[in-house]
Amino acid sequence: MSLPAHPEHRHPFLYRSIVLPVLALLRMGASPQKLAWSIALGLVVGVNPLLGSTTLLCLGLALLFRLNLPASQLANHLMYPVEVVLLFPFLKFGAFVFQTGPIPLAPKVLFAEVRSHPWTLIKSVWLWEWHALAMWAIAGAILLPLIAAILTPVLRRMLVRAEAHHAALATPISTF
């Protein structure tokens, strides 16, 4: 005879880590629209190509626009692996659009540049970074409202389902 599953282990990890916290925020009174904008902000800021800046940037923007801090930070931190993956495409696309020349990504070339022209390399890296940030800002300006528009009806449906489920649990079962 097997024991019943512990309540925390009934759902997959991602459900427990993402869906349940969002449902908890909805139940605490966060509107679906404000929560959608909070999550969208976290998702967009979370892929910004300036590594190490996302937490503070997301926090500042969420405070500025009076969004839900836990939701924006949850989405922001979930995007870290995507941020790392998108770093080089943002750098390359920025270099392409602004015609700043190729980025020396090969270790031999990079170390040769460090040894022979360190100050020039530092200036170039900052230039590539600013161009990558410009590409991210343009993409973010387009994606942020799009993501929020997609998430708002999804979160509304989640709230309705959660309220219906809660009401069903609260209704006493009649016995014959």
Image (cartoon, rainbow, N blue to C red):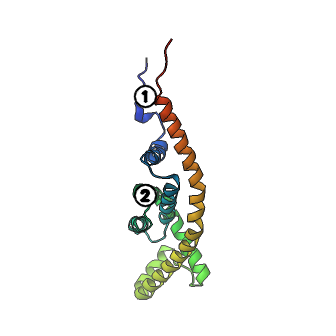
Marker count (numbered): 2
Identify the disc placed on residue 5: 1
Q: Check disc 2 and report the residue beneath it.
A: 68
Q: Position of residue 44 (x, y in %)?
A: 51, 64
Q: Position of residue 107 (x, y in %)?
A: 47, 74
| Quarter containing the N terminus | top left
Report crowding for label 2: few under 14, some 14 to 19, many 20 or more residues within 10 A (C-alpha): many
Considering only vertical position in the picture, is 105 above or below 17?
below
Provide the secondary structure element on which disc 1 rests.
loop
Amino acid type of the residue tagged 1 in the rendering: Ala
Considering only vertical position in the picture, is 78 above or below 170?
below
Marks 2 and 1: which is nearer the front? 2
Are dots 2 and 1 in contact, CB under 8 Å? no
Residue at 59 percent of width and 51 percent of height = 153
Report crowding for label 1: few under 14, some 14 to 19, many 20 or more residues within 10 A (C-alpha): few
Q: Position of residue 61 (x, y in %)?
A: 43, 68
Task: Give the CA distance from mark 2 to mark 1.
Answer: 33 Å
Residue at 41 percent of width and 85 percent of height = 118
Q: Is residue 52 left or right of residue 14?
A: left
Earlier residue among tags 2 and 1: 1
Q: Position of residue 55 (x, y in %)?
A: 39, 64
As rendered, which of 165 and 103 lies closer to the eye?
165
Q: Quadrant of residue 63?
A: bottom left
Task: Name the residue at the top extreme.
Answer: 176
Residue at 42 percent of width and 83 percent of height = 122
Provide the secondary structure element on which disc 2 rests.
loop
Identify the disc placed on residue 15: none
As rendered, which of 38 and 45 lies closer to the eye?
38
Amino acid type of the residue tagged 2 in the rendering: Asn
As rendered, which of 66 and 107 lies closer to the eye?
66
